[in-house]
Amino acid sequence: MNDRVEGAGPAGPPGTDSAGRSDRADNVVPFARPERTARGDRELRSALRGLRREIDQRFLDRTERGRGDSARTAPAAAEGTFDWIQLFDELRHRLGNTGIDERSGEVDEFGLDVLTLVRSQALLDFLVDRYWRVDLAGAEMLPEEGPVLFVANHSGLLPWDGLVFAHRLLRERPRWPRTRFLVADWLVTLPFAQPLLARLGGVRACRENTDRLLRRGRPVLAFPEGEKGAAKDFRQRYQLQRFGRGGAVKAALECGVPLVPVGIVGAEEAHPILYKSRLAGRATGLPFVPVTPTFPALGPFGLLPLPAKWSIEIGEPLDLSGVDPSAAQDELYVSRMNEQLRANIRELLARGLQRRSSAWT
């Protein structure tokens, strides 16, 4: 039986009406035809070229008006000789790659950059030998090899004490790896601070980093006073603050390395803090903004440290190699060793202050 209706057109494929139109035509977005796309590209390129010519012409006209009639004698060929879009692309590329070609290939897992240290050698030598005239005593008591955990008093927001100690100790132990100094969390989060400190040997202060460094045979300098030591006013100088919960003692016990007390005299006068502004600190991301004799009165120049005379004394190491590592879980033992370490550093500071006649000579 023929189901075709008289007068109707030929039947189309499924999904179409009798006229062959799709019943889903309203829901389908047609693809752009190739000739339309090519024409649109040509029109866009033509518009960009016209815009470039207009910018160049306006720039040249303004330049000629500024130079006077003599500029009008310049040849007309000057138009379009400078590609501003190309200049912009080149500047963007260079800014995006700033510093990449200056990175050294000898960078360890903690960010220490040998090339940066070589470039900083002259500046560090000047600070140690001429500016602060750093004396180091007690290095003969250190072991000939093997990692040690140094524990020292802390002062100042900037870690000059750790940087100077690492540089000065390397002269006494040239075969040792460079001593890594631990840096507080708030300092490594500041813009540009963390990369520079890491290249110079600074490592974020945490137990995991300390253990990894010691187990890889690298000496470490820790500051158990933490922020309390860095935030001391000048009237509290060389007064040791409380030593946390014994993290340095636990690290030395579990890694089986000597625990060495260090007393640093002179760093307190390099950045004497007269007043701490907590309000300004919250606005800048710092615990506080220090007010010193030179900062903020002298602006950025006030951040330069004062030329105080430094003396560093290394005390007798506390050999914990024969102690069972499980003693690190004994809170009473850890607390006792922590207080002994603090007392040893206090004694080193007292001797250093007694020997010096002035903070500047």
Image: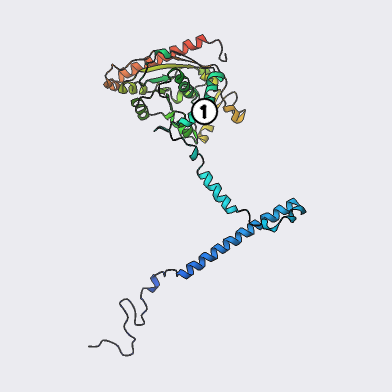
Alpha-carbon neighbours of circle 1 within 10 Å: few (<14), some, or many (≥20)? few
Name which residue type carries label 1.
Ser
Q: Quadrant of the C terminus?
A: top right
**Residue shown at 41%/13% (left/top)?**
140
> Quick check: 203 above or below 66?
above
Q: Quadrant of the N terminus?
A: bottom left
User: Residue 314: where, in percent of width, then height?
Assistant: 43, 15
Left or right relative to 16: residue 39: right
User: Residue 319: where, in percent of width, then height?
Assistant: 33, 15
In the displayed orientation, state which residue is furthest to the right.
69
User: Residue 303: where, in percent of width, then height?
Assistant: 57, 27
In the displayed orientation, state which residue is furthest to the left.
1
- The reply to whether residue 186 is visible in this rendering is no
User: Residue 295: where, in percent of width, then height?
Assistant: 59, 27
Left or right relative to 262: residue 120: right
Left or right relative to 65: residue 8: left
Tell me which corner region of the image, top left, top right, bottom left or bottom right, holds residue 62. Answer: bottom right
> Quick check: 45 above or below 200?
below
Question: What secondary structure is marked by label 1?
Answer: loop
In the displayed orientation, state which residue is furthest to the bottom.
6
Please state which of residues 155 and 106 is positioned toward the viewer in this rendering: 106
Scheme of image coloration: rainbow
Label 1 sits on residue: 120
